[in-house]
Image (cartoon, grey):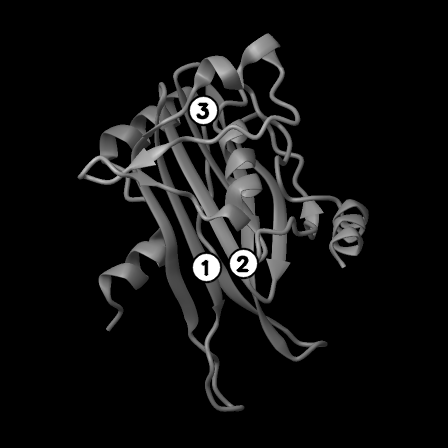
């Protein structure tokens, strides 16, 4: 039976019916689920996710993905959706880290989770292992800094979070860029593009530069 942390990691942020209804009313659609898929040619299991979301002025929700070290991943293919603030691109990888962010005004909820196939015998389908890497509750994002000159591109602005005792909770440094991208996505009004998943060529260039 999965423990609470595994359940949280698997399902993502728990949102009230009121929040979900409001997101639907303003036309923000996020597909936060991840799934375990089998590649028959490569004979391996991979994890599939969809980058999605966007914003209106006072509300935003965004989900993106990166590799286990925070690196941008190439998308499998983009999605040309009908309308905005919806699905943007599909990603498939052996391991996915999901960055999920909800913004209400300046207040943000952040969940970073890791998803990968578990280990079983050769004749069985492995379980999908899920773990929580970071959970930030009621953080604050500087919208003035983020929206200076109305230019979101190239800015690495992220919410700040504190413990119940008032101590700063640092977002893991390796995921700073991905969280910054999710923050931009959750502030991108009428979003119609990916903020962190890269084209295969761009992702290969980044990987080459890291090596």
Q: Which of the two marks, 1 or 3, is nearer to us in this view?
A: 1
For numbered disc 1, what is the local secondary structure? strand
Q: Are marks 2 and 3 in contact (CB under 8 Å)?
A: no
For numbered disc 2, what is the local secondary structure? strand
In whole angstroms, how far apart are the C-alphas of marks 2 and 1?
A: 6 Å
Q: Residues within 10 Å of mark 3 (few under 14, many from 20)?
A: some
Residue ID at (62%, 40%): 196
Q: Are marks 2 and 1 in contact (CB under 8 Å)?
A: yes
- Quarter of the rendering occupied by the C terminus: bottom right
Q: In front: 28, or 146?
A: 146
- Quarter of the rendering occupied by the N terminus: bottom left
Q: What residue is pinned by disc 2? A: 96
In whole angstroms, how far apart are the C-alphas of marks 1 and 3?
A: 28 Å
Looking at marks 2 and 3 on the same chain, the residue that comes earlier in the sequence is marked by 3
Quadrant of the image occupied by residue 164? top left
Above or below residue 144? Residue 49 is below
Q: What residue is pinned by disc 3? A: 27
Residue 8 placed where, x, y %? 30, 55
Q: What residue is pinned by disc 1? A: 114
In whole angstroms, how far apart are the C-alphas of marks 2 and 3?
A: 27 Å
């Amino acid at each position: 039976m999965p423990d609470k942390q595994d359940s949280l990691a698997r399902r993502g942020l728990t949102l009230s019916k009121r929040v979900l209804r409001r997101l639907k009313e303003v036309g923000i659609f996020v597909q936060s689920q991840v799934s375990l898929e089998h590649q028959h040619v490569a004979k391996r299991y991979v994890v599939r996710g969809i980058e999605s979301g966007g914003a209106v002025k006072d509300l935003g929700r965004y989900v993106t993905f990166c590799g286990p070290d925070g690196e941008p991943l190439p998308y499998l293919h983009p999605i040309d959706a009908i309308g905005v603030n919806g699905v943007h691109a599909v990603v498939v990888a052996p391991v996915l880290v999901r960055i999920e962010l909800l913004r209400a005004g300046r207040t943000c909820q952040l969940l970073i989770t890791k998803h990968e196939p578990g280990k079983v015998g050769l004749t069985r389908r492995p379980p999908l292992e899920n773990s929580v890497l970071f959970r930030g509750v009621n953080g604050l994002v500087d919208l003035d800094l983020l929206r200076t000159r109305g230019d979101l591109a190239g800015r690495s602005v992220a919410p700040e979070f504190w413990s119940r005792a008032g101590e700063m909770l640092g977002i893991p440094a390796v995921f700073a860029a991905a969280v910054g991208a999710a923050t931009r996505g959750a502030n991108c009004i009428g979003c119609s593009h990916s903020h962190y998943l890269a084209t295969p060529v761009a992702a290969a260039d980044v990987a080459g530069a890291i090596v």
